[in-house]
Image (cartoon, rainbow, N blue to C red):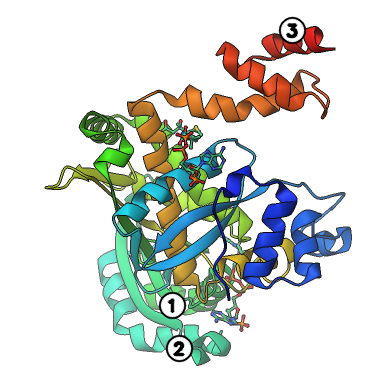
């Protein structure tokens, strides 16, 4: 496969970008069509969820300049918010100077929880369950021979006694290597199958048997060095480190800081047909693991004075199951991304989250967010104000020049133009 010519990519028309992508990624006309028009038919949608009446289209942009583990990636992002794709591209370009992003990950192990209540002797019950660990894992694995055949399946059992308002509960954690699946269906089936056995062993009553979205056994990690000069110099680097420390110390700021990270993470996840709610729930729960809601990233200055960023978060993603093999646009996006397994996808998602965070922090610590964000958002404002396609570019130009990107200002400009 040829590499994509990304020179001045953002200055091309959508048609020109598509032509370059089609050539580089060897997309068929049908695959291209799935990107241009909503690829999902009403019939296909009706097989995905209930009471279907339509589909909702969201723009898909391509993030360029990403070098991850010494390989170039073009990364589809599905998002309605202006400036997110641009910020990712900008920061990936800066990261390139020092070798791009480096990623790694744990095995794709998800946790299924089984809640046992009404246990007279919870600590002894924990021991009895662990005594039967091998038999319980075998029983779990009988539920999914395909997953086991692929080298995955239930691999461990952990048990804890949890203090709750209703007294102690025995909580079993079934650990399942889900290989290339996100794993909720596989894990839930296994947890449900184990419940009657665990009830007998614990001499209690099982209520919940469900996957946990705090997927701490399935972590994606990424780090990158951002050149100090390219960021704007020492003062900007210092400002970015202080921005991170502010977020890490104050949940009010951390919520916005992490929202910026999720701009990147959720956009790639959505474009690739992932369960965005599962990833978001995992990320925010992980950000609170120390008892306080904190930054999902860490930022520090290295001895050269460059900025080094790292991110580590739960990453429940899959390349089989869910919408991935159903949605035609997702299939095209997967081909554009060109990855082979779920772990790779998780790592790339983490890298984009890191880039996105760097992009927002750089703007916040220097010229402010409004300059870049609002100038790109100006197009939406111009359209909202009623600018026709013929004058929209002129309205945007004049709007940005006023420094007041507002609907009333846009309306005034339109009035003067027509
Ligand atoms: C918008 C930029 C990138 C402009 O920044 P710029 O300085 O004009 O960009 P540049 O001229 O330095 O260009 C560098 C590269 O950026 C890319 N680039 C540059 N412009 C574009 C564009 N129009 N469309 C696509 N790509 C673009 C492009 O790859 C380009 O390379 P080239 O192609 O020239 O070799 C910058 O101002 C920026 O990064 N702003 C931050 C935007 C941001 O973070 N948005 C997120 C939404 S705000 C939010 O929801 C989260 C927040 C902020 O609250 C989180 C938080 O508080 O932490
Ligand atoms: N809390 C949550 O996050 C919840 C999420 N969900 C939803 O569950 C769905 C994901 O469930 P998931 O279990 O991933 O999906 P699927 O059950 O559709 O796919 C997983 C199955 O695919 C088969 N398979 C084929 N090839 C592979 C491979 N290379 N690696 C792994 N498995 C393979 C396996 O066996 P086999 O063919 O035998 O099935 C496996 O069990 C998502 O739609 C999610 O939204 C559902 C409930 C709760």
Which residue carries the number 1 mark? Answer: 177
Seen from the viewer's position, the closer of residues 404 and 176 is 404
Q: Quadrant of the C terminus?
A: top right
Q: Is residue 205 visible?
A: no
Q: What element carries label 1?
A: strand
Image position of 215 (left or right of 45): left
Of callouts 1 and 2, the N-terminal one: 2
Image position of 345 (left or right of 45): left
Q: In this view, does 377 lie above or below 226?
A: above
Circles 3, 1 touching at the beta carbon (< 8 Å): no
Q: In this view, does 294 lie above or below 32?
A: above
Circles 1, 2 touching at the beta carbon (< 8 Å): yes
Mark 2 and ligand 2: say if the CB distance to the nearest ligand atom is below 8 Å.
no
Q: Is residue 126 visible?
A: yes
Of callouts 3 and 1, the N-terminal one: 1
> Within the image, what quadrant is residue 46 found in?
bottom right
Residue mark closest to the camera, 3 vs 1: 3
Give the alpha-carbon distance from disc 2 to disc 3, as whole Å. Answer: 64 Å
Crowding around mark 3 (Cα neighbors within 10 Å: few <14, some 14 to 19, many 20+) is few
Which residue carries the number 3 mark? Answer: 412
Give the alpha-carbon distance from disc 1 to disc 2, as whole Å. Answer: 8 Å
Which residue carries the number 2 mark? Answer: 151
Name the spot of residue 319 as percent of width and height, x first: 58, 72
Seen from the viewer's position, the closer of residues 117 and 276 is 276
């Amino acid at each position: 496969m040829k590499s994509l010519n990304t020179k001045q990519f953002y200055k091309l028309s959508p048609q020109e970008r598509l032509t370059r992508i089609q050539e580089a990624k060897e997309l068929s006309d049908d695959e291209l069509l799935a990107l241009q028009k909503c690829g999902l038919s009403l019939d296909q949608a009706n097989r995905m969820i209930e009471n279907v009446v339509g589909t909702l289209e969201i723009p898909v942009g391509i993030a360029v300049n990403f070098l991850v583990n010494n390989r170039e990636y073009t990364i589809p992002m599905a998002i309605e918010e202006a400036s997110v794709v641009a910020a990712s591209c900008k920061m990936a370009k800066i990261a390139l100077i020092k070798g791009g992003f480096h990623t790694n990950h744990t095995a794709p192990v998800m946790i299924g929880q089984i809640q046992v209540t009404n246990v007279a002797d919870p600590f002894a019950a924990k021991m009895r369950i662990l005594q039967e660990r091998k038999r319980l894992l075998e029983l779990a694995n009988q539920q999914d021979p395909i997953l086991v055949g692929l080298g995955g399946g239930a691999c461990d059992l952990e048990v804890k006694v949890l203090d709750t308002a209703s007294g102690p509960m025995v909580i079993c954690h079934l650990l399942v290597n889900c290989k290339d699946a996100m794993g909720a269906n596989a894990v839930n089936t296994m947890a449900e199958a184990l419940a009657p056995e665990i009830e007998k062993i614990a001499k209690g009553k099982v209520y919940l048997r469900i996957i946990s979205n705090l997927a701490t056994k399935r972590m994606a990690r990424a780090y990158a060095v951002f050149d100090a000069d390219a960021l704007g110099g020492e003062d900007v680097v210092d400002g970015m480190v202080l921005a991170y420390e502010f977020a890490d110390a104050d949940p009010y700021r951390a919520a916005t800081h992490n929202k910026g990270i999720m701009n990147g993470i959720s956009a790639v996840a959505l474009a690739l047909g992932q369960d965005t709610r599962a990833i978001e729930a995992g990320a925010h729960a992980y950000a609170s693991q120390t008892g306080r809601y904190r930054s999902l990233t860490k930022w520090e200055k290295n001895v050269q004075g460059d900025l080094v960023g790292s991110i580590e978060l739960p990453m429940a993603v899959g390349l089989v199951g869910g919408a991935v093999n159903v949605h035609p646009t997702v299939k095209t996006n997967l081909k554009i991304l060109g990855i082979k397994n779920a772990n790779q996808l998780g790592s790339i998602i983490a890298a984009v989250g890191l880039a996105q965070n760097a992009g927002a922090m750089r703007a916040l610590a220097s010229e402010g967010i409004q300059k870049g964000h609002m100038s790109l958002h100006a197009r939406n404002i111009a359209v909202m104000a009623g600018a026709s396609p013929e004058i929209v570019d002129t309205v945007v130009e004049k709007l940005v020049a006023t420094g007041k990107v507002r609907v009333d200002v846009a309306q005034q400009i339109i009035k003067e133009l027509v």
